[in-house]
Protein backbone atom coordinates (compact mmCIF):
# COMPACT_ATOMS: atom_id res chain seq x y z
CA UNK A 1 0.00 0.00 0.00
CA UNK A 2 2.76 2.38 -0.90
CA UNK A 3 1.18 4.30 -3.77
CA UNK A 4 0.09 7.89 -4.04
CA UNK A 5 2.12 10.95 -4.89
CA UNK A 6 0.97 13.38 -2.20
CA UNK A 7 3.29 14.46 0.60
CA UNK A 8 0.66 14.23 3.34
CA UNK A 9 -1.42 11.06 3.21
CA UNK A 10 -4.66 10.91 5.15
CA UNK A 11 -3.74 7.45 6.40
CA UNK A 12 -0.23 6.09 6.87
CA UNK A 13 0.57 2.56 8.06
CA UNK A 14 4.13 1.58 8.87
CA UNK A 15 5.25 -1.99 9.60
CA UNK A 16 1.95 -3.01 11.19
CA UNK A 17 2.19 -6.37 12.92
CA UNK A 18 -0.61 -8.14 14.78
CA UNK A 19 -1.11 -11.66 16.15
CA UNK A 20 -4.44 -13.08 17.28
CA UNK A 21 -4.78 -16.43 19.05
CA UNK A 22 -1.15 -17.24 18.41
CA UNK A 23 -1.48 -16.66 14.65
CA UNK A 24 0.23 -13.83 12.79
CA UNK A 25 -2.59 -11.87 11.13
CA UNK A 26 -0.62 -8.84 9.91
CA UNK A 27 3.07 -9.20 9.19
CA UNK A 28 4.79 -5.89 8.53
CA UNK A 29 2.17 -4.08 6.43
CA UNK A 30 3.06 -0.66 5.02
CA UNK A 31 0.62 1.58 3.20
CA UNK A 32 -1.13 4.89 2.76
CA UNK A 33 -4.28 6.49 1.39
CA UNK A 34 -4.16 9.92 -0.21
CA UNK A 35 -6.96 12.51 -0.47
CA UNK A 36 -9.23 11.76 -3.43
CA UNK A 37 -7.94 8.19 -3.80
CA UNK A 38 -9.77 4.87 -3.62
CA UNK A 39 -7.65 1.94 -2.43
CA UNK A 40 -9.19 -1.53 -2.52
CA UNK A 41 -7.89 -4.37 -0.34
CA UNK A 42 -8.25 -7.82 -1.90
CA UNK A 43 -7.39 -11.14 -0.36
CA UNK A 44 -8.75 -14.55 0.61
CA UNK A 45 -10.65 -15.06 3.85
CA UNK A 46 -8.25 -14.81 6.79
CA UNK A 47 -5.77 -12.62 4.92
CA UNK A 48 -6.00 -9.88 7.57
CA UNK A 49 -8.11 -7.32 5.70
CA UNK A 50 -10.65 -6.58 8.45
CA UNK A 51 -7.91 -6.54 11.11
CA UNK A 52 -6.01 -3.98 9.05
CA UNK A 53 -9.10 -1.77 8.87
CA UNK A 54 -9.45 -2.09 12.64
CA UNK A 55 -5.86 -0.96 13.11
CA UNK A 56 -6.34 1.92 10.67
CA UNK A 57 -9.26 3.37 12.63
CA UNK A 58 -7.79 2.77 16.08
CA UNK A 59 -10.09 -0.09 17.12
CA UNK A 60 -7.32 -2.70 17.00
CA UNK A 61 -4.00 -2.10 18.74
CA UNK A 62 -1.10 -3.41 16.62
CA UNK A 63 1.62 -5.37 18.37
CA UNK A 64 4.13 -3.10 16.66
CA UNK A 65 4.25 -0.47 13.96
CA UNK A 66 2.60 2.92 13.68
CA UNK A 67 -0.74 4.22 12.41
CA UNK A 68 -1.12 7.87 11.47
CA UNK A 69 -4.53 9.38 10.68
CA UNK A 70 -4.16 12.96 9.46
CA UNK A 71 -0.79 13.05 11.14
CA UNK A 72 -1.85 11.65 14.53
CA UNK A 73 -2.37 8.30 16.23
CA UNK A 74 -6.11 7.46 16.25
CA UNK A 75 -5.76 5.33 19.41
CA UNK A 76 -4.01 7.89 21.58
CA UNK A 77 -5.68 10.98 20.08
CA UNK A 78 -9.48 10.55 19.94
CA UNK A 79 -9.97 13.96 18.34
CA UNK A 80 -8.29 12.82 15.14
CA UNK A 81 -10.95 10.12 14.73
CA UNK A 82 -13.34 12.91 13.77
CA UNK A 83 -11.57 12.79 10.41
CA UNK A 84 -12.69 9.20 9.93
CA UNK A 85 -15.88 7.54 8.75
CA UNK A 86 -16.21 3.77 9.24
CA UNK A 87 -18.75 1.45 7.57
CA UNK A 88 -18.61 -2.07 9.07
CA UNK A 89 -19.52 -5.22 7.18
CA UNK A 90 -22.50 -5.81 9.47
CA UNK A 91 -25.21 -3.17 9.23
CA UNK A 92 -24.82 -0.66 12.08
CA UNK A 93 -28.38 0.66 12.15
CA UNK A 94 -31.32 0.76 14.55
CA UNK A 95 -33.97 -1.36 12.77
CA UNK A 96 -37.02 -0.01 14.62
CA UNK A 97 -36.14 3.64 14.13
CA UNK A 98 -36.94 5.52 10.96
CA UNK A 99 -34.30 6.43 8.40
CA UNK A 100 -34.27 10.05 9.53
CA UNK A 101 -34.17 9.05 13.22
CA UNK A 102 -31.16 6.83 12.52
CA UNK A 103 -29.33 9.68 10.83
CA UNK A 104 -30.19 12.06 13.67
CA UNK A 105 -28.91 9.56 16.25
CA UNK A 106 -25.64 8.89 14.44
CA UNK A 107 -25.10 12.56 13.68
CA UNK A 108 -25.37 13.48 17.34
CA UNK A 109 -23.09 10.58 18.30
CA UNK A 110 -20.47 11.97 15.94
CA UNK A 111 -20.71 15.45 17.42
CA UNK A 112 -22.69 17.24 14.72
CA UNK A 113 -24.39 20.25 16.31
CA UNK A 114 -28.19 20.37 16.54
CA UNK A 115 -28.49 23.47 14.38
CA UNK A 116 -26.37 22.01 11.55
CA UNK A 117 -27.64 18.42 11.66
CA UNK A 118 -31.10 18.79 9.98
CA UNK A 119 -29.54 20.27 6.84
CA UNK A 120 -26.92 17.54 6.69
CA UNK A 121 -29.58 14.86 7.10
CA UNK A 122 -31.57 16.33 4.21
CA UNK A 123 -28.48 16.33 2.01
CA UNK A 124 -27.56 12.80 3.08
CA UNK A 125 -31.04 11.51 2.20
CA UNK A 126 -30.93 13.15 -1.22
CA UNK A 127 -27.35 12.08 -1.91
CA UNK A 128 -28.08 8.48 -0.93
CA UNK A 129 -31.27 8.30 -2.99
CA UNK A 130 -33.36 7.95 0.17
CA UNK A 131 -35.28 11.24 0.18
CA UNK A 132 -38.62 9.44 -0.18
CA UNK A 133 -37.87 7.06 2.70
CA UNK A 134 -37.00 9.41 5.56
CA UNK A 135 -40.03 8.37 7.60
CA UNK A 136 -39.72 4.66 6.78
CA UNK A 137 -38.60 2.18 9.41
CA UNK A 138 -35.19 0.71 8.59
CA UNK A 139 -36.60 -2.82 8.87
CA UNK A 140 -38.84 -2.10 5.86
CA UNK A 141 -35.95 -1.08 3.57
CA UNK A 142 -34.34 -3.29 0.94
CA UNK A 143 -30.82 -4.56 1.50
CA UNK A 144 -29.39 -2.04 -0.95
CA UNK A 145 -31.16 0.87 0.75
CA UNK A 146 -29.84 -0.22 4.14
CA UNK A 147 -26.31 -0.36 2.74
CA UNK A 148 -26.66 3.14 1.32
CA UNK A 149 -28.04 4.39 4.63
CA UNK A 150 -25.12 2.81 6.44
CA UNK A 151 -22.72 4.71 4.19
CA UNK A 152 -24.40 8.12 4.40
CA UNK A 153 -24.73 7.78 8.18
CA UNK A 154 -20.93 7.54 8.39
CA UNK A 155 -20.54 10.82 6.48
CA UNK A 156 -22.67 13.22 8.51
CA UNK A 157 -19.62 14.62 10.31
CA UNK A 158 -17.88 15.15 6.92
CA UNK A 159 -14.84 12.91 7.43
CA UNK A 160 -11.73 13.16 5.29
CA UNK A 161 -11.19 9.37 5.20
CA UNK A 162 -13.80 6.64 4.75
CA UNK A 163 -13.14 2.98 5.60
CA UNK A 164 -15.60 0.36 4.30
CA UNK A 165 -15.59 -3.35 5.08
CA UNK A 166 -17.38 -5.28 2.28
CA UNK A 167 -19.84 -2.48 1.45
CA UNK A 168 -21.73 -4.40 -1.26
CA UNK A 169 -22.24 -7.77 0.43
CA UNK A 170 -25.71 -9.15 -0.18
CA UNK A 171 -26.99 -6.38 -2.47
CA UNK A 172 -28.33 -6.66 -6.00
CA UNK A 173 -26.70 -5.31 -9.15
CA UNK A 174 -28.64 -2.04 -9.17
CA UNK A 175 -27.85 -1.33 -5.53
CA UNK A 176 -24.19 -2.15 -6.13
CA UNK A 177 -24.09 0.30 -9.03
CA UNK A 178 -25.61 3.04 -6.89
CA UNK A 179 -23.06 2.44 -4.13
CA UNK A 180 -20.26 2.61 -6.70
CA UNK A 181 -21.61 5.97 -7.86
CA UNK A 182 -21.71 7.26 -4.29
CA UNK A 183 -18.13 6.24 -3.64
CA UNK A 184 -16.96 7.75 -6.91
CA UNK A 185 -18.62 11.05 -5.97
CA UNK A 186 -16.86 11.05 -2.61
CA UNK A 187 -13.49 10.55 -4.30
CA UNK A 188 -14.22 13.46 -6.63
CA UNK A 189 -14.85 15.60 -3.53
CA UNK A 190 -11.39 14.73 -2.17
CA UNK A 191 -12.34 12.04 0.35
CA UNK A 192 -9.82 9.22 0.71
CA UNK A 193 -11.41 5.76 0.68
CA UNK A 194 -10.10 2.37 1.79
CA UNK A 195 -12.31 -0.63 0.96
CA UNK A 196 -12.14 -4.34 1.60
CA UNK A 197 -14.22 -6.30 -0.89
CA UNK A 198 -14.77 -9.60 -2.67
CA UNK A 199 -16.42 -7.66 -5.50
CA UNK A 200 -13.77 -7.68 -8.23
CA UNK A 201 -15.98 -5.66 -10.56
CA UNK A 202 -16.03 -3.00 -7.88
CA UNK A 203 -12.26 -3.14 -7.55
CA UNK A 204 -11.68 -2.85 -11.31
CA UNK A 205 -14.17 -0.06 -11.88
CA UNK A 206 -13.46 2.05 -8.78
CA UNK A 207 -9.93 1.53 -7.52
CA UNK A 208 -7.06 3.87 -8.17
CA UNK A 209 -4.97 1.14 -6.57
CA UNK A 210 -5.66 -2.44 -5.53
CA UNK A 211 -3.64 -4.16 -2.83
CA UNK A 212 -3.42 -7.96 -2.61
CA UNK A 213 -3.11 -9.00 1.03
CA UNK A 214 -2.16 -12.66 1.50
CA UNK A 215 -1.24 -14.26 4.84
CA UNK A 216 -0.94 -10.84 6.43
CA UNK A 217 1.50 -9.47 3.87
CA UNK A 218 1.15 -7.20 0.87
CA UNK A 219 1.92 -9.43 -2.10
CA UNK A 220 1.13 -7.10 -4.98
CA UNK A 221 -0.31 -3.65 -5.56
CA UNK A 222 -0.92 -1.18 -8.32
CA UNK A 223 -3.51 0.28 -10.67
CA UNK A 224 -5.87 -2.47 -11.91
CA UNK A 225 -5.10 -2.04 -15.61
CA UNK A 226 -1.37 -1.96 -14.99
CA UNK A 227 -1.51 -5.16 -12.94
CA UNK A 228 -3.47 -6.98 -15.65
CA UNK A 229 -1.06 -5.77 -18.32
CA UNK A 230 2.04 -6.78 -16.36
CA UNK A 231 0.58 -10.23 -15.61
CA UNK A 232 -0.71 -11.09 -19.09
CA UNK A 233 0.74 -8.72 -21.66
CA UNK A 234 -0.94 -9.45 -25.00
CA UNK A 235 -2.06 -12.95 -23.95
CA UNK A 236 -5.39 -14.29 -22.78
CA UNK A 237 -6.15 -16.14 -19.58
CA UNK A 238 -6.46 -19.93 -19.71
CA UNK A 239 -8.26 -21.98 -17.04
CA UNK A 240 -8.23 -25.81 -17.18
CA UNK A 241 -10.57 -27.72 -14.84
CA UNK A 242 -9.82 -31.44 -14.39
CA UNK A 243 -12.21 -34.19 -13.32
CA UNK A 244 -9.72 -35.30 -10.67
CA UNK A 245 -6.49 -34.06 -9.18
CA UNK A 246 -3.45 -34.55 -11.44
CA UNK A 247 -0.84 -37.14 -10.49
CA UNK A 248 2.79 -35.98 -9.98
CA UNK A 249 3.64 -37.06 -13.52
CA UNK A 250 0.60 -35.31 -14.96
CA UNK A 251 1.40 -32.22 -12.92
CA UNK A 252 4.77 -32.17 -14.63
CA UNK A 253 3.06 -32.09 -18.03
CA UNK A 254 0.85 -29.22 -16.89
CA UNK A 255 3.87 -27.30 -15.62
CA UNK A 256 5.69 -27.83 -18.92
CA UNK A 257 2.76 -26.20 -20.67
CA UNK A 258 3.09 -23.16 -18.39
CA UNK A 259 0.10 -23.98 -16.19
CA UNK A 260 0.11 -23.56 -12.40
CA UNK A 261 -2.16 -25.39 -9.91
CA UNK A 262 -5.02 -23.74 -8.05
CA UNK A 263 -6.99 -25.25 -5.15
CA UNK A 264 -5.33 -28.64 -4.79
CA UNK A 265 -4.44 -29.37 -8.39
CA UNK A 266 -7.87 -29.77 -10.00
CA UNK A 267 -7.86 -26.23 -11.41
CA UNK A 268 -4.88 -24.98 -13.41
CA UNK A 269 -4.25 -21.47 -14.72
CA UNK A 270 -2.03 -20.13 -17.45
CA UNK A 271 -1.93 -17.96 -20.54
CA UNK A 272 -2.55 -18.51 -24.22
CA UNK A 273 -1.74 -16.24 -27.17
CA UNK A 274 -4.47 -14.21 -28.80
CA UNK A 275 -3.96 -16.10 -32.05
CA UNK A 276 -4.42 -19.50 -30.30
CA UNK A 277 -1.46 -20.97 -32.23
CA UNK A 278 -0.36 -22.91 -29.14
CA UNK A 279 -3.82 -24.24 -28.24
CA UNK A 280 -3.51 -27.43 -30.30
CA UNK A 281 -0.20 -28.26 -28.64
CA UNK A 282 -1.34 -28.15 -25.04
CA UNK A 283 -4.63 -29.88 -25.89
CA UNK A 284 -2.68 -32.75 -27.46
CA UNK A 285 -0.32 -32.97 -24.48
CA UNK A 286 -3.19 -33.08 -21.97
CA UNK A 287 -4.86 -35.91 -23.89
CA UNK A 288 -1.59 -37.84 -24.16
CA UNK A 289 -1.04 -37.52 -20.39
CA UNK A 290 -4.42 -39.14 -19.71
CA UNK A 291 -5.85 -36.04 -18.10
CA UNK A 292 -9.64 -35.93 -17.99
CA UNK A 293 -10.56 -32.33 -18.68
CA UNK A 294 -13.92 -31.13 -17.40
CA UNK A 295 -13.71 -27.60 -18.76
CA UNK A 296 -11.34 -25.30 -20.60
CA UNK A 297 -11.93 -21.55 -20.46
CA UNK A 298 -10.15 -18.88 -22.45
CA UNK A 299 -11.05 -15.31 -21.66
CA UNK A 300 -9.78 -11.77 -21.71
CA UNK A 301 -7.55 -11.27 -18.67
CA UNK A 302 -8.91 -9.28 -15.78
CA UNK A 303 -8.28 -8.61 -12.11
CA UNK A 304 -9.82 -11.95 -11.13
CA UNK A 305 -7.06 -13.73 -13.04
CA UNK A 306 -4.40 -11.60 -11.39
CA UNK A 307 -5.88 -12.47 -7.99
CA UNK A 308 -5.86 -16.17 -8.85
CA UNK A 309 -2.22 -16.09 -9.94
CA UNK A 310 -1.13 -14.15 -6.83
CA UNK A 311 -3.09 -16.11 -4.21
CA UNK A 312 -3.69 -19.50 -5.85
CA UNK A 313 -7.39 -19.08 -5.06
CA UNK A 314 -10.51 -18.06 -6.92
CA UNK A 315 -12.20 -15.10 -5.28
CA UNK A 316 -15.93 -15.70 -5.01
CA UNK A 317 -18.73 -13.44 -3.84
Image (cartoon, rainbow, N blue to C red):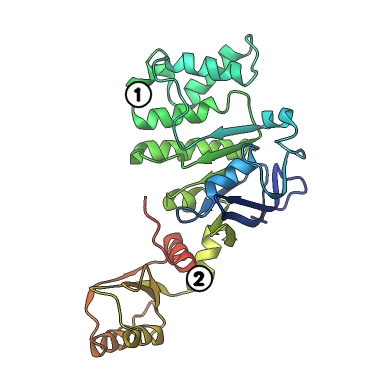
Across and down, in percent, residue 137 comes to 37, 16
Foreground of the two, 132 or 33: 33
Residue 57: which quarter of the image? top right
**Numbered badge on residue 141:** 1
Asked which quadrant contains residue 213, the reply is bottom right
- Residue 35 image offset from top left, x and y in percent: 67, 42
Q: Are marks 2 and 1 in contact (CB under 8 Å)?
A: no
Disc marking residue 211:
none
Report crowding for label 1: few under 14, some 14 to 19, many 20 or more residues within 10 A (C-alpha): some
The residue that mark 2 highlights is: 231
Side of 66 relative to 221 (left or right): right
Residue shown at 44%/30% (left/top)?
Answer: 91
Left or right: where does residue 81 sit relative to residue 259? right
Q: Measuring from the top left, give residue 125's x and y in whole percent.
A: 48, 21
Circle 2 packing at 10 Å, graded few (<14), some (14-19), many (20+), is some
Q: Residue furthest top?
A: 115
Q: Quadrant of the N terminus?
A: bottom right
Compared with 237, 17 (above or below) is above
What is the count of numbered marks?
2
Q: Secondary structure at mark 2?
A: helix
Mark 1 element type? loop
Amino acid sequence: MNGGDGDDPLLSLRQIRKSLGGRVVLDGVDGCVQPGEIVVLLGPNGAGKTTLLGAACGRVAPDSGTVSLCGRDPRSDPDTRRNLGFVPQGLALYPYLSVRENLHTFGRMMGVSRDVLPGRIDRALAWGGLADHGASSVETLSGGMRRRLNIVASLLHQPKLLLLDEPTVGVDVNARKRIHELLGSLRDEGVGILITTHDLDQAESLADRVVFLVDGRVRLEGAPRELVQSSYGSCRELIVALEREASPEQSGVMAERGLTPVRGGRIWAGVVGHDFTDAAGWTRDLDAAGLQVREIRIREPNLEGVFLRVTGEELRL
